[in-house]
Image (tube, coloured by chain):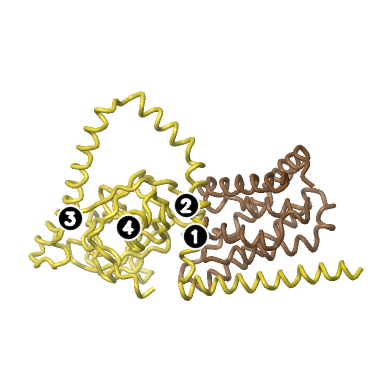
Chain colours: A yellow, B brown
Amino acid sequence: METVFKKSFKEFYSFIILVLLSILTIAADYKYNQLDYVRSLLNDTVIYPIDYLSTMPKKILEASVEETQIKEEMENKIKLLENENLKLKIQLQEFQALKDENLRLRKMSEASSKISDKQTLAKVINNKAHPSKKIVSIDKGKKDGVFIGQNVLGLKGLIGQVIETSYLSSKVLLISDLNSNIPSQITRTGEKVIVKGKEKSNELDIPFAPMDMDLKLGDVITTSGMADRFKPNIPIGKISAIDNDKEKKFAKITVVPNENIGNSSELILIWDYKPNTKNE
Amino acid sequence: MNNFLIILVTLVIALALTIITFVFGEYSPDWLYLVVIYWILAVPNSIGLTTSWFIGLLTDVAFGTILGSNALTFVLIAFIITKTYKFVRYLTVYQQSIIIFLLLFLKQTILMWIDGMIRMEEIVLSAYYWSVLISSLVWPLVYFVLRYIRRKYDVV
């Protein structure tokens, strides 16, 4: 009888110790960010291989289809052209914003005059890396120098930012997530607004726009560079609907992003902008 | 050794299923919780509290939640099951589903509470509680598959 009690007590104490350890872990992770190393280690050794393997069948299928269609030479040529195209498209994004700014006869700010010269293409491993948030995992990590807060673009506009890095992979929070607020501006008027994600993936929201704000359908929205999170003048999307309901305090404005957010298989990481992530 | 291997394989499959079913969003069941609960029910000494704590830590990494939150709920659920397996084991599978529902409801409430305390994010209730319902519906499936595996490979 005594041994049963002893065993039961031992179990109880280990339960209490583990609960305390969990609380300690939560505190250490939240307050002091001390456990990034543990997270990164577990991610690289366990999660990444399983993630990679579980998406393997799909990839093999895609690869075999590709092989039968295109010869190697063609592929090389296409790669060259694609790289060139990429650079041009990124330049174009910024020229569009500059054009609008010039229309307003404003002097360009210093920050917007530089065009990124280094980009890295990252492949999406899993475009649904979280059950409820809009997070994708990509195959570039600390090994390639990816840092937290790094801006992630598509060919036509902003896609998101890096929120977690491990040695081999990292996670990107998309701008269509409910919790991402992007400081942005309307290029035609220069007014600053905040663009917010929505439940739907192909729509964004401007939640706090005053009723009398000068807005038109089709106005281009770009990042403003305020709060030092995103590089200025990256295009986000266009205004697609304005709902001026007089009974509410704010107008309801819907933005359609340029990029098909969440469905792209390749993303672009830019390097010339280091966001300020210290005050988090 | 054999036991260890079989349980490890089922846990790895559960983790892979977790990652694959991220596609279903909030409707994806908690595979890891179900598998751990099954093994503790069927073979009480197979997964100890410390092991379940580590599985919880892995879950935290997979979900990107704050490290330790899932570990806490894993330990809690493992402890409750090890204390009550004698009773729960003799219920029918569908009655067990109700127990699973209650346990996971408790777990999600704790997780939501932790999230609410430490994060300045909007909390969407549906993101937490759909998975509880789906998990308890999936439980009979997990139960029969794992029972088949347990009998075939003679895990005791």
Residue A272 at x, y percent in the picture: 22, 60
Q: Do discs 4 and 2 belong to a common subunit?
A: yes
Residue extending farthest to the top is A68
The N terminus of chain A: image quadrant: bottom right
Task: Tell me the distance, in whole angstroms, between the alpha carbons under discs 1 and 3.
Answer: 33 Å
Q: Is residue B76 left or right of residue B118?
A: right
Q: Nearer the viewer, residue A67 or A182?
A: A67
The kind of residue tagged 1 is Gly
Kind of element beneath mark 2: loop
Pointer 2 residue:
A129
Task: Tell me the distance, in whole angstroms, between the alpha carbons under discs 3 and 4.
Answer: 25 Å
Q: Is residue A252 visible?
A: no
Packing grade of label 1 (10 A; few <14, some 14-19, many >=20) is some
Q: Which of the 4 image quadrants contains residue A148? A: bottom left
Packing grade of label 4 (10 A; few <14, some 14-19, many >=20) is few
Pointer 1 residue:
B64
In primary-sequence order, the first of circles 3 and 4 is 3
Q: Nearer the viewer, residue B34 or A175?
A: B34
Residue A259 at x, y percent in the picture: 30, 49
Pointer 4 residue:
A145
Q: Which of the 4 image quadrants contains residue B103? A: bottom right
